[in-house]
Amino acid sequence: MIENSADLAELQRAIAAIVPAAALETVQLPGDHGLRLVLLEAAYPQHLLDGDAVIKIMNEPMYWAFCWAAGQCLAQFLTEQPHYVAGKRVLDFGAGSGVVALAAARAGARSVVVCDSDPLACTASRLDAALNGVAIEIISDLEQLTGAADLVLAADVLYDRGNLHWLQAFLNVAPCVLLADSRIRDFSEPGYSLLTTRSSHTLPDLDESGEFRQVRVYLGERQGDD
């Protein structure tokens, strides 16, 4: 049962505006981090998605209502390798539901900043942080970041090749980046190296093709830094 709150009510209204019969539910994520998220119910009525609803979803994707494969894999990676975030100030870019930010907080980050341009994603991250008992700071643009960041975290932000410019921008913000991606196969960005490959799927399950269930985690390091 999800405790009632203004944030939850706001997210539920956003869901109902597209699929009136759909609802949100609290989901226990797989993995050792013990995180729970408020997501679109697994049994949401896909048959009620008429043409207008599909257009709405395409124009205003509800990234925050799903926990994507790359986000899950990066969250689990931080749980297994907490030294990447322990004692550091980290920024989770394009946070969506906030799963990576929450995992970083659980793994010992000194402070966690969530950055997402979607106000509903910011609301979802705030709700999920409260649900998991962790503290986060929320901004809607990188320019709002005050003070230095030690590490940028990013998952599922390369769904469009037009977003590749962010990779250098991340290294301008912090000396190190952890990036999880399941979309780009010919990834060869300077300064980034492959750490591991993992498998997962979106929650609720979108029945994506196998290639999008294979997630690669990369480490980016600012050139010239020791």
Image (cartoon, grey):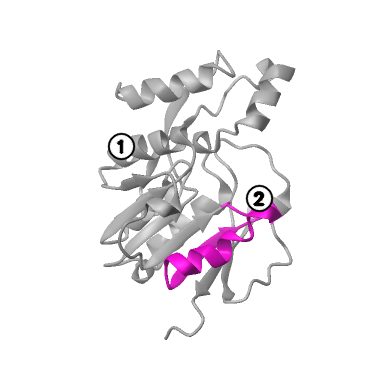
Q: Is residue 171 highlighted in magenta?
A: yes
Amino acid type for the residue under numbered disc 2: Tyr
Residue at the image position 66 percent from the left and 15 percent from the top: 48
Residue at the image position 70 percent from the left and 55 percent from the top: 161
Residue that mark 1 sits on: 131
Q: Secondary structure at mark 2?
A: loop
What label does residue 174 carry, if any? none
In the picture, which quadrant includes the N terminus?
top left
Is residue 223 visible to the viewer in this orientation of the structure? Answer: yes
Q: Which residues, given as a range, are shown in magenta? A: 156-183
User: Percent position (x, y) of residue 126?
Assistant: 34, 38
User: Percent position (x, y) of residue 128?
Assistant: 36, 38
Residue that mark 2 sits on: 159
For the residues bearing labels 2 and 1, Cβ distance under 8 angstroms: no
Q: Is residue 78 highlighted in magenta?
A: no
Answer few, some or many: residues within 10 Å of disc 1's Cα (few below 14, many 20 plus, some between 14 and 19). Answer: some
Residue at the image position 43 percent from the left and 44 percent from the top: 140
Q: Quadrant of residue 216?
A: bottom right
Above or below, 47 relative to 26:
above
Kindly give the residue lying farthest to the front in the view shown. Answer: 143
**Image check: 151 left or right of 188?**
left
